[in-house]
Each structure stands twice: as C-alpha cells, then as structure tokens.
Amino acid sequence: MIINGVTIDETFAEAFPMKGTRLIITALNAKWAMISAQAFTGFATSVIACGCEAGIERELDPSETPDGRPGVSVLIFAMGGKGLAKQVETRAGQCVLTSPTSALFSGLDNPEKEIALGQNLRYFGDGFQISKMIDGKRYWRVPVMDGEFLTQEKTGVHDSVGGGNFLVLAESQAQALTACEAAIVEMKKIPNVIMPFPGGVVRSGSKVGSKFKALNASTNDAFCPTLKGQTKSDLSPEVESVMEIVIDGLTKEDIDKAMKVGIQAVCDLGADNGIRRISAGNYGGKLGPFHFHLQEIMA
Amino acid sequence: MSALTFTLKAAPAQRVDCSLLTPDELAEKSVADIAAIELAVGNTVERVDSLFDISGNDVNDIKFSNSCDKLDFVGRNMTSGKITIDGNVGAYLGIFLEGGEIEVNGNTEGYTACEMKSGQIKINGNAGDFLGGVRPGRRNGMTGGVVIVTGDTGARTGDHMRRGMILIEGNAGDYCGSRMISGTIAVLGNVGSHLGYAMKRGTVLLTKAPSQGISANFNDCGSHTLAFLPLLFASFTKLDSQFAKVDSFSRVQRYAGDVGGIGMGEILVKI
C-alpha cells in the first residue's frame, strides 16, 4: 500500500493489555490545572521503568468539570490494577494534593472495579478531614494551607490497551520530527488515548529482550539508521531517521482511530517531504495479543 | 393498573400501625388478602377494610387518602415503590426506609425518617420533632437517603444522624443537628436555638445567619471558598425542591463545634 508516495508496510503494531483510568484535575484557573496535570503525568513514558504510562488527554472547560472550574483530564495506565492503584496514589499525593488550588476527581465510572483515589490521601488531614457523600459518590475534604483539597474517594478502572504504535521512516531527522509533530496534532483530537512519550514522540524505540541479562528491552537495532551495515537492518539506504509514536487507549478501537489519523497526517506530508515508509513495532507475537494491522487501519 | 389507594373512612380513636401497608409487604397479595390484613390499633387489631376503603391494585404505587396524624409507621422498612399520603400522617413515617419514595401532602408527627437508610421522603408541609433522628437508646439516626421538607421542622432535627441529607425549605426547630455524627442538613429559613448541640461531625448549611447568633460552643474558623459546595448544589438540581433553584455558592463562614465534645462538626453560613 502506498499513500502519497509513502509505503505502508504490510505489518502490524503489537500491543498488550493494561489497566487504565481517567482522572480530572481542576484548579482555580487553567494554568494551574495544567501545571498539576503535567506534574502528575511526569516520568510516565513507559512501564519499562516508570511503573506506568500517563499523559494529558485534553483541557476541560469549566462546564465539563465536576466543580465548575477549569480542568485537565489525564489518562494513566499500568500493567495491573495494583500497580495502577500505587501509581495513582503516589502521584496524586505528591503532584496534585501539593498543587495550589487543585481538586481531583474520577473521570471514569466503573463500580465493578475501582481503585483508591483520595481514599488514603485523606489521612494527610490528620483527623481533620471531612467525608461528604454527594450523589452516591464519596468525596474527601482535606484541610491544606491554601484552603481545602477536595478529592473523590475512588476511581474506576478500565481494561485498556497499551503499546499501540507506528514508525515514521524519513530521509532526515528534521523531516521525521516534523511528520510526527503533525501526527500528534491530529491524534490529540481523538478521545480516550494518550501518546505518553515526550511530546508524543519516541526516538528510542525498543525491541523485546537484550544481550544483557539485566535488561528486558533494548534498542530496536533493525530500525537504527547508523547500524544499517552492522545488523539485520530493516532500513533502505535513503532512510536516515526513524521515530515512533506510541499510543495507549481505553479500547483497541480508540487506538485504531488515533493510528489512522496520525498515519494519515504523516502521509499528507508525503514523499515530497522526505517521508518514505510507515512501519510498526512487530515483535513476532512476543509482546502482546493486540495486533494493529497498518494496511487494514488505512484501508 | 391503578394506584392501590387506602381512603381512611374516619379518623381512628387510637393510633394505627400501618407498617404492613408497604409495597414489600403487599407484594403478590390480592385486594381481598390486603383487605383482610389486621393492623394494630391501640391495644387491639382491626382489618384493613374496616379502617379504609380500598381501590386500585398497584402495590408499588400506594396512596393514603383522607389521612390523619393517627397513622403511624407508614413506609416502615420499605425498599422500593412509592407511597403518597394526602393529609397529615403520624409518627415514624419512613422508619428504616431502605429505598423507594414517600411523599406527604400534609404534616408529619415525630421521628419521621427515623433511622432511614436510603430512598427519598418529601414532606409538602411541616415535620415533627426528631426528623431523621434515632430511637431512644440507639446509636445511629438516619444513615442515608434524602429528606425534603417544604415547611418547618420540629426540635432535634437530625438527632444522631450519621449520613444522608435533610433539606429544609422553611425553618428548623431548636437543637437542629443535635448529637449529629455526620451527613448534611441544609436550611433555607431560620434555625432555632442550640443549633448543633453536642454535634460530633457533619455539616449544617445555612443560607442566612441565625438571628440569635452561633452557639458559644462553635468556634469561628473564618470565611472560605469550599470546593465541595458547587458539587452539593449540582446534586440538588435533580430534586423537586426549592433547593434546586438556589443559586450555587461556595463562599461561607465556617464555624466548628460542638467544642464541648470532639468539635469536628461544622456550621456553614452563606456570606
């Protein structure tokens, strides 16, 4: 398949099951809601070493938030419910509770599977915390130095998908980066997904395993342009740079949509802008059960 | 199917225990079966059809017409369905209510919503003493649900209340929120004396300051913007109540007490 001079490889991205939740962070104004959300989603690019993958889904208008203040919705994913609960609690405690004027709510209802949100953070109140049941949901009012930190007690957990991806193969670093930036602009318009790496783009895509026993992932040498003559390379001579966009989503369908608009944005730049191929991280079935076939998505 | 209607033939001389006339108790009973049910009346018993004219057959939609304040325990232990009462009703309306809805177009006697667990009670009139309260010797009053009173309430509203919400569109009597453990009482009108007496935790929300001031057992914590109040007002908008029309506010003067006890309760007054 070729779109605007860009070859779409007959391959698939391989993704794996995760547990995810959406949180809504509000503050006195949009600036401080974003600061808190950025802190919460910091150091959360990959479960390989961060324990979770998290990102900002979108900014929320005051009419969309529980307390009528400006907000930001974030998505956070981990390999299991316990891991997710630990990450949510520590990040909420250190990054949202501490952030001036913030409040924290669940953005995903699932009564059958919930994890603690403010359930344990309340103890920071040292006995002065106050519980309020409103519309069947429990909230905690924790006294803090700027007033009160309001947080919902629990948030729902959703069976999710992590590691959806595609690779952009270009004639230069600058062209690969420009194409990825264009893709991210379009992908950010899709709900229920995040692109957890810096700016949504990862330049150090990994393969499963390593020659070093301590590592369970290592550089994807087949797509490293400087190794074209040293390893079993997947790159043609004219490709000088490869960048990857990784997508986590609440459902496989959400990732399908995000990949489609992202790849289309890259292809719109086309061969005239140095984009040669779109490929994907395919690990021969070692990584996970969710397969995103590029040509089917773009058909 | 039409509402199962019990029309009181004449005001009884003694108090009538109506706890057997709920959707749960009457499920799968024929009208003849219902007519033959014996209710405790004072120190004797009487058949339902000797006290009431019965019409309709929908046991999930029960109506009491021509009701009077001698009918006690209406809606006791009810878990679903609706009971509508046209006229006044006696004591212990909705005691132990676990679900469903009770609406009274009249006044209620004492202990309305006593130890209620869930569901909704709306009183289009006045409520007696110990609304949402606790039976003598017991530890927890109302533990959930919503009670709306369009008129006034008697003394000791929310006595030992543990959870849930009492919304009073009129005035609350003396000792409102007494011994309250948790939950929320909101009042649009005035409150009587000794507000929050022996209150442990919980919230009393007032739209205007009490004319007699706040009890010395409550300490002024200053004026604040509290983030939970907009959520609370948003939850009111679904209710058939004046509270649905109140403009949301989050600026309040906060008083903590009763400091004669653990002092973790709060009175919030709109500013």
Image: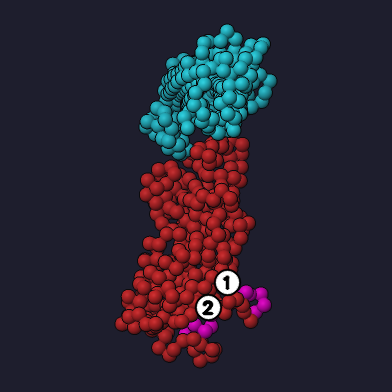
Type of the residue with mark 2: Asn
Q: Residues within 10 Å of mark 1 (few under 14, many from 20)?
A: some
Q: Can residue A25 be seen here?
A: yes
User: According to the image, label 2 marks what residue?
Assistant: A282
Quarter that holds the C terminus of chain B:
top left
Q: Are marks 2 and 1 on the same chain?
A: yes
| Chain A shade in the render | red
Q: Residue at x 45, y 79 (%)?
A: A279
| Residue kind at label 1, given as amino acid type | Gly
- Determine the colour of chain B: cyan
Residue extending furthest toward the right: B137
The chain that hosts pointer 2 is A
The magenta stretch is: A212-226
> Relative to B264, does residue B12 appear above or below in the rendering?
above
The residue under label 1 is A288
Q: Position of residue B268 (x, y in %)?
A: 48, 28
Q: Out of B122 and B248, give the one closest to the viewer.
A: B122
User: Residue B60: x, y in percent?
Assistant: 53, 32
Q: Residue furthest front?
A: B32
Assign a secondary structure to mark 1.
loop
Q: Residue at x 57, y 65 (%)?
A: A17
Alpha carbons under labels 2 and 1: distance apart: 10 Å
Residue that protrudes farthest toward the top in the picture: B13
Residue nearer the viewer, A167 or A26: A167
